[in-house]
Amino acid sequence: MKLKNGTKFKLNVELSKLKEIEKEISMLKSASALLYWDRATILPAKAVPERSEQAAYLSKLIHEKLISKELKRIINILSEPNNIKKLDKISQLIVKKYQKDLKKLTKIPTSHVEEFSRLCIKSLESWEKARNKNDFKIFQPYLQKVLEMKLQEVSYIDSKSHPYNVLLDDYEEGMTVESVKKVFEKLKYGLLEIISKVKTTDKYLKSKRQINKLSQLDFPLEQQREIIEEIRKMILVDMDRTIIAESVHPFTNTISSDDVRITTAYRKGQPLFAFTSTAHECGHALYELDFDPKVRDTILFNAPSYGLHESQSRIWENQIMRSEDFWKYYFPRFKKKFPSLKNIKREEFYELMNQVKESLVRIECDEVTYCLHIIIRFEIEVALLEGKIKVKDLPQEWNKKYQEYLHIKPRNDKVGVLQDMHWSEGLFGYFPTYAIGTMYSAMLFKQMCKDNPKLMQEIKKGKVDFVRSWLKEHVHKHAGKYLAKDVVKKATGKYLSPDDFLEYLNEKYGKIYGF
Protein backbone atom coordinates (compact mmCIF):
# COMPACT_ATOMS: atom_id res chain seq x y z
CA MET A 1 0.00 0.00 0.00
CA LYS A 2 1.42 3.36 -1.03
CA LEU A 3 0.66 6.80 0.31
CA LYS A 4 -0.76 9.10 -2.33
CA ASN A 5 1.71 11.84 -3.09
CA GLY A 6 4.07 10.33 -0.47
CA THR A 7 3.89 13.51 1.56
CA LYS A 8 6.00 13.95 4.66
CA PHE A 9 2.85 15.07 6.49
CA LYS A 10 1.10 11.74 5.87
CA LEU A 11 4.18 9.81 6.89
CA ASN A 12 4.28 11.74 10.14
CA VAL A 13 0.61 10.91 10.75
CA GLU A 14 1.40 7.20 10.38
CA LEU A 15 4.45 7.53 12.61
CA SER A 16 2.31 9.21 15.28
CA LYS A 17 -0.16 6.32 15.12
CA LEU A 18 2.73 3.87 15.44
CA LYS A 19 4.02 5.72 18.50
CA GLU A 20 0.57 5.53 20.11
CA ILE A 21 0.42 1.77 19.62
CA GLU A 22 3.99 1.33 20.86
CA LYS A 23 3.20 3.37 23.96
CA GLU A 24 0.21 1.15 24.72
CA ILE A 25 2.32 -1.99 24.26
CA SER A 26 5.04 -0.53 26.47
CA MET A 27 2.56 0.18 29.28
CA LEU A 28 1.09 -3.31 29.08
CA LYS A 29 4.58 -4.82 29.20
CA SER A 30 5.36 -2.66 32.24
CA ALA A 31 2.28 -3.99 34.01
CA SER A 32 3.22 -7.55 33.08
CA ALA A 33 6.79 -7.04 34.34
CA LEU A 34 5.46 -5.64 37.61
CA LEU A 35 3.28 -8.71 38.11
CA TYR A 36 6.33 -10.91 37.50
CA TRP A 37 8.41 -8.96 40.01
CA ASP A 38 5.65 -9.26 42.59
CA ARG A 39 5.29 -12.99 41.88
CA ALA A 40 9.00 -13.65 42.44
CA THR A 41 9.38 -11.54 45.58
CA ILE A 42 6.31 -11.10 47.80
CA LEU A 43 3.22 -12.75 46.27
CA PRO A 44 1.26 -14.88 48.80
CA ALA A 45 1.33 -18.59 47.90
CA LYS A 46 -2.44 -18.88 47.57
CA ALA A 47 -2.53 -16.00 45.09
CA VAL A 48 -0.65 -17.94 42.39
CA PRO A 49 -3.73 -19.28 40.50
CA GLU A 50 -5.27 -15.81 40.21
CA ARG A 51 -1.91 -14.34 39.23
CA SER A 52 -1.63 -16.85 36.39
CA GLU A 53 -4.95 -15.56 35.03
CA GLN A 54 -3.81 -11.94 35.35
CA ALA A 55 -0.51 -12.68 33.58
CA ALA A 56 -2.27 -14.64 30.84
CA TYR A 57 -4.71 -11.78 30.23
CA LEU A 58 -1.92 -9.24 29.86
CA SER A 59 0.01 -11.57 27.53
CA LYS A 60 -3.12 -11.87 25.42
CA LEU A 61 -3.56 -8.09 25.23
CA ILE A 62 0.09 -7.53 24.31
CA HIS A 63 -0.02 -10.19 21.59
CA GLU A 64 -3.26 -8.78 20.17
CA LYS A 65 -1.71 -5.32 19.99
CA LEU A 66 1.39 -6.70 18.26
CA ILE A 67 -0.54 -8.59 15.59
CA SER A 68 -3.32 -6.03 15.12
CA LYS A 69 -4.43 -5.13 11.62
CA GLU A 70 -3.74 -1.48 12.38
CA LEU A 71 -0.09 -2.10 13.29
CA LYS A 72 0.41 -4.27 10.21
CA ARG A 73 -1.22 -1.60 8.05
CA ILE A 74 1.08 1.10 9.41
CA ILE A 75 4.22 -1.02 8.99
CA ASN A 76 3.22 -1.97 5.43
CA ILE A 77 2.87 1.71 4.54
CA LEU A 78 6.06 2.87 6.23
CA SER A 79 8.12 -0.01 4.81
CA GLU A 80 7.37 0.88 1.20
CA PRO A 81 10.74 1.67 -0.48
CA ASN A 82 9.72 5.22 -1.36
CA ASN A 83 8.47 5.85 2.17
CA ILE A 84 11.04 4.23 4.41
CA LYS A 85 13.91 6.18 2.84
CA LYS A 86 12.19 9.40 3.95
CA LEU A 87 12.13 8.35 7.60
CA ASP A 88 14.82 9.23 10.12
CA LYS A 89 17.34 6.51 10.97
CA ILE A 90 15.70 5.37 14.22
CA SER A 91 12.25 5.17 12.61
CA GLN A 92 13.73 3.08 9.79
CA LEU A 93 15.21 0.65 12.30
CA ILE A 94 11.90 0.42 14.18
CA VAL A 95 9.98 -0.37 10.98
CA LYS A 96 12.50 -3.01 9.88
CA LYS A 97 12.40 -4.65 13.32
CA TYR A 98 8.61 -4.84 13.20
CA GLN A 99 8.74 -6.28 9.69
CA LYS A 100 10.86 -9.16 10.96
CA ASP A 101 9.00 -9.74 14.21
CA LEU A 102 5.52 -9.57 12.68
CA LYS A 103 6.39 -12.37 10.29
CA LYS A 104 6.86 -14.54 13.36
CA LEU A 105 4.23 -13.15 15.74
CA THR A 106 1.32 -13.22 13.30
CA LYS A 107 1.78 -16.96 12.89
CA ILE A 108 1.19 -17.67 16.60
CA PRO A 109 -2.51 -17.79 17.63
CA THR A 110 -3.46 -15.48 20.49
CA SER A 111 -5.11 -18.43 22.24
CA HIS A 112 -1.74 -20.22 22.26
CA VAL A 113 0.02 -17.21 23.80
CA GLU A 114 -2.65 -16.89 26.48
CA GLU A 115 -2.65 -20.60 27.32
CA PHE A 116 1.15 -20.74 27.45
CA SER A 117 1.37 -17.75 29.79
CA ARG A 118 -1.14 -19.40 32.12
CA LEU A 119 0.79 -22.67 31.96
CA CYS A 120 4.13 -21.01 32.80
CA ILE A 121 2.83 -19.55 36.07
CA LYS A 122 1.65 -23.00 37.16
CA SER A 123 4.77 -24.67 35.81
CA LEU A 124 7.00 -22.31 37.79
CA GLU A 125 5.02 -23.09 40.93
CA SER A 126 5.40 -26.83 40.30
CA TRP A 127 9.15 -26.38 39.78
CA GLU A 128 9.41 -24.62 43.15
CA LYS A 129 7.48 -27.43 44.86
CA ALA A 130 9.56 -30.11 43.14
CA ARG A 131 12.76 -28.33 44.12
CA ASN A 132 11.69 -27.95 47.75
CA LYS A 133 10.68 -31.61 47.95
CA ASN A 134 13.63 -32.77 45.85
CA ASP A 135 11.37 -34.70 43.49
CA PHE A 136 11.56 -34.20 39.71
CA LYS A 137 8.35 -36.19 39.15
CA ILE A 138 6.29 -33.32 40.61
CA PHE A 139 7.60 -31.04 37.86
CA GLN A 140 7.72 -33.62 35.06
CA PRO A 141 4.10 -33.37 33.74
CA TYR A 142 4.26 -29.58 33.65
CA LEU A 143 7.61 -29.57 31.85
CA GLN A 144 6.23 -32.10 29.36
CA LYS A 145 3.35 -29.75 28.57
CA VAL A 146 5.70 -26.73 28.33
CA LEU A 147 7.91 -28.62 25.86
CA GLU A 148 4.91 -29.68 23.78
CA MET A 149 3.63 -26.10 23.59
CA LYS A 150 7.07 -24.74 22.60
CA LEU A 151 7.33 -27.34 19.84
CA GLN A 152 3.84 -26.34 18.73
CA GLU A 153 5.00 -22.72 18.67
CA VAL A 154 7.95 -23.74 16.50
CA SER A 155 5.60 -25.49 14.06
CA TYR A 156 3.50 -22.32 13.78
CA ILE A 157 6.56 -20.18 13.01
CA ASP A 158 8.74 -22.38 10.80
CA SER A 159 8.15 -26.12 10.67
CA LYS A 160 11.00 -26.67 8.20
CA SER A 161 13.84 -25.25 10.32
CA HIS A 162 15.62 -26.93 13.21
CA PRO A 163 13.40 -26.26 16.26
CA TYR A 164 16.37 -24.96 18.24
CA ASN A 165 17.13 -22.34 15.58
CA VAL A 166 13.59 -20.98 15.79
CA LEU A 167 13.78 -20.64 19.58
CA LEU A 168 17.40 -19.43 19.67
CA ASP A 169 16.44 -16.53 17.41
CA ASP A 170 14.44 -15.04 20.30
CA TYR A 171 17.62 -14.72 22.37
CA GLU A 172 20.54 -14.55 19.93
CA GLU A 173 19.30 -13.19 16.63
CA GLY A 174 21.50 -14.29 13.76
CA MET A 175 22.96 -17.36 15.48
CA THR A 176 22.12 -21.00 14.72
CA VAL A 177 22.52 -24.29 16.52
CA GLU A 178 25.46 -25.11 14.24
CA SER A 179 27.26 -21.81 14.85
CA VAL A 180 26.82 -22.23 18.61
CA LYS A 181 28.09 -25.81 18.46
CA LYS A 182 31.19 -24.68 16.57
CA VAL A 183 32.09 -22.00 19.14
CA PHE A 184 31.19 -24.24 22.09
CA GLU A 185 33.39 -27.08 20.86
CA LYS A 186 36.45 -24.81 20.83
CA LEU A 187 35.44 -23.34 24.18
CA LYS A 188 34.86 -26.76 25.73
CA TYR A 189 38.25 -28.16 24.82
CA GLY A 190 39.99 -24.97 25.91
CA LEU A 191 38.25 -25.13 29.29
CA LEU A 192 39.00 -28.81 29.78
CA GLU A 193 42.68 -28.08 29.09
CA ILE A 194 42.77 -25.29 31.71
CA ILE A 195 40.93 -27.44 34.25
CA SER A 196 43.44 -30.21 33.64
CA LYS A 197 46.30 -27.77 34.32
CA VAL A 198 44.66 -26.53 37.52
CA LYS A 199 44.00 -30.04 38.83
CA THR A 200 47.65 -31.07 38.55
CA THR A 201 48.88 -28.26 40.81
CA ASP A 202 49.76 -28.74 44.47
CA LYS A 203 47.58 -25.78 45.42
CA TYR A 204 44.50 -27.40 43.90
CA LEU A 205 45.18 -30.79 45.46
CA LYS A 206 45.65 -29.15 48.84
CA SER A 207 42.47 -27.07 48.55
CA LYS A 208 40.50 -30.15 47.56
CA ARG A 209 41.35 -31.76 50.90
CA GLN A 210 40.24 -28.68 52.83
CA ILE A 211 36.98 -26.82 53.37
CA ASN A 212 37.04 -23.27 52.01
CA LYS A 213 37.78 -21.08 55.04
CA LEU A 214 35.27 -18.44 53.97
CA SER A 215 32.38 -20.89 54.32
CA GLN A 216 33.23 -21.38 58.00
CA LEU A 217 33.27 -17.70 58.93
CA ASP A 218 30.46 -15.54 60.23
CA PHE A 219 29.20 -12.89 57.82
CA PRO A 220 26.18 -11.24 59.52
CA LEU A 221 23.27 -10.56 57.21
CA GLU A 222 22.95 -6.91 58.17
CA GLN A 223 26.58 -6.21 57.25
CA GLN A 224 26.14 -8.09 53.97
CA ARG A 225 23.23 -5.78 53.13
CA GLU A 226 25.39 -2.73 53.88
CA ILE A 227 28.13 -4.03 51.57
CA ILE A 228 25.59 -4.68 48.84
CA GLU A 229 24.36 -1.10 49.05
CA GLU A 230 27.94 0.13 48.58
CA ILE A 231 28.35 -2.04 45.49
CA ARG A 232 25.03 -0.84 44.06
CA LYS A 233 26.10 2.79 44.47
CA MET A 234 29.50 2.10 42.94
CA ILE A 235 28.03 0.54 39.79
CA LEU A 236 24.70 2.29 39.32
CA VAL A 237 25.31 5.75 40.86
CA ASP A 238 21.67 6.85 40.35
CA MET A 239 19.75 5.18 43.18
CA ASP A 240 16.45 6.91 42.34
CA ARG A 241 15.81 4.63 39.36
CA THR A 242 16.41 1.25 41.00
CA ILE A 243 15.45 -0.83 44.02
CA ILE A 244 16.65 -4.17 45.36
CA ALA A 245 14.74 -7.04 46.98
CA GLU A 246 15.35 -10.70 47.79
CA SER A 247 14.26 -13.74 45.80
CA VAL A 248 15.12 -17.43 45.53
CA HIS A 249 17.05 -16.79 42.31
CA PRO A 250 18.65 -13.33 41.70
CA PHE A 251 17.31 -11.50 38.65
CA THR A 252 16.83 -8.08 37.04
CA ASN A 253 13.45 -6.84 35.86
CA THR A 254 12.82 -3.66 33.91
CA ILE A 255 9.41 -2.18 34.68
CA SER A 256 10.02 1.01 32.71
CA SER A 257 12.87 3.27 31.59
CA ASP A 258 13.23 4.80 35.07
CA ASP A 259 12.25 1.72 37.07
CA VAL A 260 14.77 -1.13 36.87
CA ARG A 261 14.60 -3.61 39.73
CA ILE A 262 17.07 -6.22 40.89
CA THR A 263 16.99 -9.01 43.45
CA THR A 264 19.71 -10.82 45.31
CA ALA A 265 19.86 -13.87 47.57
CA TYR A 266 21.83 -14.85 50.65
CA ARG A 267 23.27 -18.35 51.01
CA LYS A 268 24.41 -19.87 54.26
CA GLY A 269 28.10 -20.79 54.14
CA GLN A 270 28.56 -18.73 50.96
CA PRO A 271 29.29 -15.19 52.15
CA LEU A 272 30.24 -13.90 48.71
CA PHE A 273 27.18 -15.22 46.89
CA ALA A 274 25.08 -12.11 47.54
CA PHE A 275 28.08 -9.87 46.76
CA THR A 276 28.81 -11.34 43.33
CA SER A 277 25.12 -11.82 42.51
CA THR A 278 24.40 -8.17 43.25
CA ALA A 279 27.36 -6.99 41.15
CA HIS A 280 26.07 -9.23 38.35
CA GLU A 281 22.50 -7.92 38.48
CA CYS A 282 23.70 -4.31 38.75
CA GLY A 283 25.54 -4.84 35.47
CA HIS A 284 22.25 -5.86 33.86
CA ALA A 285 20.45 -2.90 35.41
CA LEU A 286 23.08 -0.37 34.30
CA TYR A 287 22.69 -1.55 30.70
CA GLU A 288 18.91 -0.99 30.77
CA LEU A 289 19.27 2.42 32.44
CA ASP A 290 21.74 3.58 29.77
CA PHE A 291 19.55 2.91 26.71
CA ASP A 292 19.23 5.83 24.30
CA PRO A 293 16.17 7.85 25.50
CA LYS A 294 15.20 8.34 21.84
CA VAL A 295 14.08 4.70 21.63
CA ARG A 296 12.04 4.77 24.85
CA ASP A 297 8.66 3.04 24.47
CA THR A 298 9.68 1.52 21.13
CA ILE A 299 10.52 -1.98 19.96
CA LEU A 300 14.21 -0.96 20.09
CA PHE A 301 14.13 -0.34 23.86
CA ASN A 302 15.83 -3.68 24.46
CA ALA A 303 19.25 -5.25 24.25
CA PRO A 304 19.79 -6.90 20.84
CA SER A 305 20.60 -10.23 22.48
CA TYR A 306 20.60 -11.90 25.85
CA GLY A 307 24.25 -12.81 25.37
CA LEU A 308 25.26 -9.17 25.03
CA HIS A 309 23.14 -8.38 28.09
CA GLU A 310 24.92 -11.14 30.01
CA SER A 311 28.30 -9.73 29.01
CA GLN A 312 27.47 -6.49 30.80
CA SER A 313 26.82 -8.30 34.08
CA ARG A 314 29.85 -10.58 33.69
CA ILE A 315 32.23 -7.66 33.26
CA TRP A 316 31.23 -6.23 36.65
CA GLU A 317 31.00 -9.56 38.43
CA ASN A 318 34.14 -11.23 37.09
CA GLN A 319 36.58 -8.96 35.28
CA ILE A 320 36.21 -6.21 37.88
CA MET A 321 34.91 -7.48 41.21
CA ARG A 322 36.72 -10.80 41.19
CA SER A 323 39.95 -9.12 40.14
CA GLU A 324 43.02 -8.83 42.34
CA ASP A 325 43.24 -5.09 41.74
CA PHE A 326 39.68 -4.47 42.93
CA TRP A 327 40.35 -6.28 46.19
CA LYS A 328 43.53 -4.28 46.76
CA TYR A 329 41.12 -1.36 47.06
CA TYR A 330 38.10 -2.96 48.69
CA PHE A 331 39.46 -5.60 51.09
CA PRO A 332 40.24 -3.16 53.96
CA ARG A 333 36.63 -1.90 53.84
CA PHE A 334 35.30 -5.44 53.57
CA LYS A 335 37.40 -6.59 56.51
CA LYS A 336 36.07 -3.78 58.73
CA LYS A 337 32.53 -4.98 58.12
CA PHE A 338 33.38 -8.60 58.92
CA PRO A 339 35.72 -9.04 61.92
CA SER A 340 35.75 -12.80 61.27
CA LEU A 341 38.27 -12.03 58.49
CA LYS A 342 40.86 -10.67 60.94
CA ASN A 343 43.25 -13.61 60.45
CA ILE A 344 42.91 -13.76 56.67
CA LYS A 345 45.19 -11.70 54.45
CA ARG A 346 44.04 -10.10 51.23
CA GLU A 347 46.11 -12.43 49.05
CA GLU A 348 44.55 -15.50 50.67
CA PHE A 349 41.05 -14.01 50.47
CA TYR A 350 41.49 -13.31 46.74
CA GLU A 351 42.60 -16.88 46.08
CA LEU A 352 39.77 -18.33 48.18
CA MET A 353 37.10 -16.34 46.32
CA ASN A 354 38.55 -17.49 42.98
CA GLN A 355 39.05 -21.10 43.99
CA VAL A 356 38.41 -23.64 41.25
CA LYS A 357 36.21 -26.39 42.63
CA GLU A 358 33.93 -29.18 41.56
CA SER A 359 30.53 -27.56 41.96
CA LEU A 360 27.17 -29.07 41.10
CA VAL A 361 25.31 -25.75 41.00
CA ARG A 362 25.78 -23.37 38.07
CA ILE A 363 25.28 -20.09 39.94
CA GLU A 364 27.66 -21.15 42.72
CA CYS A 365 30.57 -22.34 40.59
CA ASP A 366 33.82 -20.65 39.56
CA GLU A 367 34.77 -18.82 36.36
CA VAL A 368 36.76 -21.73 34.95
CA THR A 369 34.05 -24.38 35.13
CA TYR A 370 31.01 -22.13 34.61
CA CYS A 371 30.71 -22.45 30.85
CA LEU A 372 30.85 -26.25 31.05
CA HIS A 373 27.63 -26.07 33.07
CA ILE A 374 26.13 -24.09 30.19
CA ILE A 375 27.41 -26.45 27.50
CA ILE A 376 25.80 -29.36 29.36
CA ARG A 377 22.43 -27.59 29.34
CA PHE A 378 22.79 -26.64 25.68
CA GLU A 379 23.52 -30.22 24.63
CA ILE A 380 20.58 -31.54 26.67
CA GLU A 381 18.19 -28.92 25.25
CA VAL A 382 19.15 -29.70 21.66
CA ALA A 383 18.69 -33.44 22.25
CA LEU A 384 15.34 -32.81 23.95
CA LEU A 385 14.01 -30.68 21.08
CA GLU A 386 15.29 -33.20 18.53
CA GLY A 387 13.40 -35.95 20.38
CA LYS A 388 16.57 -37.89 21.19
CA ILE A 389 15.80 -37.84 24.92
CA LYS A 390 12.49 -37.73 26.81
CA VAL A 391 11.44 -35.41 29.63
CA LYS A 392 11.23 -38.36 32.03
CA ASP A 393 14.88 -39.19 31.31
CA LEU A 394 16.24 -35.70 32.08
CA PRO A 395 17.59 -36.48 35.59
CA GLN A 396 19.60 -39.43 34.29
CA GLU A 397 20.86 -37.53 31.24
CA TRP A 398 21.80 -34.56 33.44
CA ASN A 399 23.75 -36.73 35.86
CA LYS A 400 25.53 -38.51 32.99
CA LYS A 401 26.72 -35.22 31.47
CA TYR A 402 27.99 -33.92 34.82
CA GLN A 403 29.94 -37.10 35.35
CA GLU A 404 31.42 -36.86 31.85
CA TYR A 405 32.44 -33.18 31.87
CA LEU A 406 32.96 -32.28 35.51
CA HIS A 407 33.56 -35.73 37.04
CA ILE A 408 30.88 -35.19 39.69
CA LYS A 409 27.43 -36.68 40.10
CA PRO A 410 24.50 -34.73 41.59
CA ARG A 411 23.44 -36.22 44.90
CA ASN A 412 19.81 -35.27 44.28
CA ASP A 413 17.50 -33.49 41.84
CA LYS A 414 17.59 -30.18 43.74
CA VAL A 415 21.27 -29.65 42.94
CA GLY A 416 20.84 -31.46 39.64
CA VAL A 417 18.16 -31.07 37.01
CA LEU A 418 15.91 -28.90 39.23
CA GLN A 419 18.43 -26.16 40.03
CA ASP A 420 17.35 -23.74 37.27
CA MET A 421 13.93 -22.18 36.73
CA HIS A 422 14.39 -21.56 32.98
CA TRP A 423 12.65 -24.65 31.57
CA SER A 424 9.59 -24.06 33.74
CA GLU A 425 9.03 -20.88 31.70
CA GLY A 426 9.81 -22.50 28.36
CA LEU A 427 13.11 -20.66 27.91
CA PHE A 428 14.67 -23.26 25.61
CA GLY A 429 17.55 -21.61 23.78
CA TYR A 430 18.30 -19.20 26.61
CA PHE A 431 21.14 -21.08 28.31
CA PRO A 432 23.73 -20.60 25.52
CA THR A 433 23.48 -16.84 26.07
CA TYR A 434 25.28 -17.19 29.40
CA ALA A 435 28.39 -18.62 27.74
CA ILE A 436 28.10 -16.29 24.76
CA GLY A 437 27.90 -13.37 27.19
CA THR A 438 30.90 -14.65 29.12
CA MET A 439 32.96 -14.71 25.92
CA TYR A 440 31.70 -11.28 24.87
CA SER A 441 32.64 -9.88 28.29
CA ALA A 442 36.27 -10.97 27.88
CA MET A 443 36.42 -9.49 24.38
CA LEU A 444 34.92 -6.16 25.48
CA PHE A 445 37.00 -5.86 28.64
CA LYS A 446 40.22 -6.60 26.74
CA GLN A 447 39.39 -3.78 24.33
CA MET A 448 38.49 -1.50 27.23
CA CYS A 449 41.93 -2.08 28.75
CA LYS A 450 43.57 -1.35 25.38
CA ASP A 451 41.68 1.93 25.17
CA ASN A 452 42.76 2.82 28.71
CA PRO A 453 46.05 1.10 29.68
CA LYS A 454 45.74 2.57 33.19
CA LEU A 455 42.30 1.07 33.82
CA MET A 456 43.40 -1.59 36.33
CA GLN A 457 45.35 1.07 38.23
CA GLU A 458 42.13 3.08 38.46
CA ILE A 459 40.18 0.04 39.65
CA LYS A 460 42.86 -0.46 42.31
CA LYS A 461 41.75 2.94 43.64
CA GLY A 462 38.05 2.11 43.43
CA LYS A 463 37.50 4.27 40.35
CA VAL A 464 35.15 2.75 37.78
CA ASP A 465 33.94 5.85 35.93
CA PHE A 466 35.81 4.86 32.78
CA VAL A 467 34.17 1.42 32.80
CA ARG A 468 30.71 2.96 32.96
CA SER A 469 31.40 5.58 30.28
CA TRP A 470 33.12 3.10 27.92
CA LEU A 471 30.26 0.60 28.18
CA LYS A 472 27.67 3.32 27.63
CA GLU A 473 29.44 4.63 24.55
CA HIS A 474 30.26 1.27 22.93
CA VAL A 475 27.36 -0.94 24.06
CA HIS A 476 24.59 0.51 26.23
CA LYS A 477 23.42 3.54 24.25
CA HIS A 478 22.72 1.46 21.14
CA ALA A 479 19.90 -0.47 22.85
CA GLY A 480 18.34 -2.69 20.15
CA LYS A 481 19.39 -0.68 17.11
CA TYR A 482 21.96 -3.21 15.88
CA LEU A 483 22.61 -6.95 16.11
CA ALA A 484 24.78 -8.00 19.05
CA LYS A 485 27.49 -9.42 16.80
CA ASP A 486 27.75 -6.05 15.04
CA VAL A 487 27.89 -4.09 18.31
CA VAL A 488 30.76 -6.29 19.50
CA LYS A 489 32.51 -6.18 16.11
CA LYS A 490 32.37 -2.39 16.08
CA ALA A 491 33.67 -2.18 19.66
CA THR A 492 36.43 -4.81 19.42
CA GLY A 493 37.07 -5.40 15.73
CA LYS A 494 36.19 -9.10 16.17
CA TYR A 495 33.21 -11.44 16.01
CA LEU A 496 32.37 -13.95 18.75
CA SER A 497 35.30 -16.17 19.72
CA PRO A 498 36.40 -17.98 22.91
CA ASP A 499 40.03 -16.90 22.41
CA ASP A 500 40.05 -13.79 24.64
CA PHE A 501 38.13 -15.58 27.39
CA LEU A 502 40.50 -18.56 27.39
CA GLU A 503 43.47 -16.18 27.39
CA TYR A 504 41.97 -14.33 30.37
CA LEU A 505 41.47 -17.58 32.30
CA ASN A 506 44.95 -18.89 31.51
CA GLU A 507 46.56 -15.65 32.67
CA LYS A 508 44.49 -15.20 35.83
CA TYR A 509 44.38 -18.79 37.05
CA GLY A 510 47.88 -19.56 35.88
CA LYS A 511 49.01 -16.87 38.31
CA ILE A 512 46.79 -18.16 41.13
CA TYR A 513 47.67 -21.84 40.70
CA GLY A 514 51.18 -21.51 39.32
CA PHE A 515 50.92 -23.21 35.94
Image (spheres, rainbow, N blue to C red):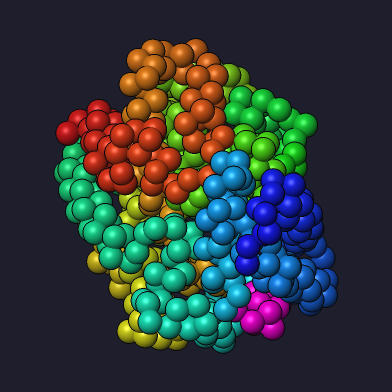
Can residue 399 be seen? no
Q: Residue furthest front?
A: 5
Residue 296 appears at what percent x and percent y? 69, 43
Decide: is 488 above or below 146. above
Does residue 35 appear in the picture of this structure? yes
- Left or right: 221 in relation to 455: right
> Which range of residues does the magenta coloring cover?
108-121
Residue 33 place in picture, x, y as percent: 73, 57
Tell me, yes or no, whether the highlighted magenta stretch contains residue 117. Answer: yes
Residue beneath the point at 20% across and 30% down: 514
Left or right: residue 502 versus residue 140 is left
Residue at point 34% right, 29% down?
446
Residue 441 in the image: x percent, y percent?
40, 39
43 above or below 12?
below
Q: Main secondary structure of the magenta part?
A: helix
**In the image, residue 19 lies at what x, y percent?**
74, 51
Inspect the magenta stretch and tell me whether residue 192 lies in it. no
- Residue 129 or residue 439, whichever sits in front: 439
Taking the spot 37% from the left edge, 59% from the top edge, the residue there is 175
Measured along the vertical axis of the image, is residue 406 above or below residue 63?
above
